[in-house]
Image (cartoon, rainbow, N blue to C red):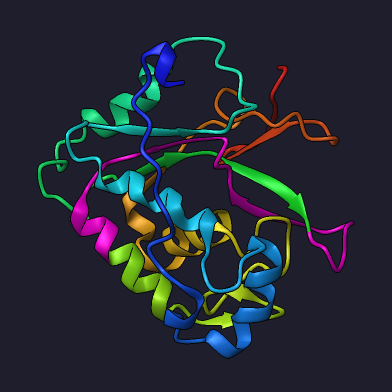
Amino acid sequence: LQNLGYHVSVQSSPVGIHQLQHFDAAAEILRDVNDASDRLPDFARLHAYQLEEYDAVVMVDFDTLVLGSVDEALDLIVGDKNGGASGSSSSVSAVFSWEHVPLMSHPEAKASVINLSFFVLRPSKDMYELLVATLKKAPFSATRGWGSTGRGAFPGWMTTQGFLTYFYDEVRNGAKVEMNQCAFGNTAESSPSKLITNGGTVDCDS
């Protein structure tokens, strides 16, 4: 990547398992998911919030295909009138779509979780510090997952995906904008893709 002109920054997780307040409940599952004895490598993604030299940062999975302009999503961050208040609860901190994944205990049931294949965020060291502090003390249950509400066990539930779903659902609910999943982060789910709106449900291909 460096030979192609990319700047590569290697980061480790900002939190170790032993720093988690609910270590006893989470440790075994986190070790299995992250395949590490005391570090949580997937949470290295949180360092993206420290890139304050940029107006907006996009986390994109390696298997995500960008088919057109994403300015509409970026403008929700860059054009936010409250954006100058770094870490402010009134500013938009993240722009993303939801995806519906099967629960591991009941595959016929699905949980709505943040789709990290295309995730736009506002860099803010204040928000980064809040995320790390929240991660250390976040309530956790082996059956519920992160948070007091929880979504149960789903693929990615104990990684950054599960934690950010909890964070933007229970901690900073007003700091997010949810995108049209038909246009952004479409995962081509096995069931017909639908967009749930205030006015009802719409087929993505309509």
Residue 106 x %, y %: 87, 65
With 182 as the anchor, is 121 left or right in this view? Answer: left
Position above or below: 153 against 87: below
* Depth order, front residue of 96/58: 58
Residue 189 in view: yes
Give me the residue at 38% from left, 67% from top: 171
Specify whether residue 121 is painted magenta: yes
Residues rendered magenta in the picture: 103-129
Give me the residue at 69% from left, 80% from top: 142
Position above or below: 74 against 138: above
Figure disc tally: 0
Residue 204 x %, y %: 69, 24
Give me the residue at 52% from left, 75% from top: 147
Specify whether residue 177 is painted magenta: no
Position above or below: 192 against 27: above
Position above or below: 163 against 28: above
Residue 163 x %, y %: 51, 62
* Depth order, front residue of 85/155: 155
Q: Give the quarter of the image for residue 128.
A: bottom left
With 133 as the anchor, is 13 left or right in this view? Answer: right
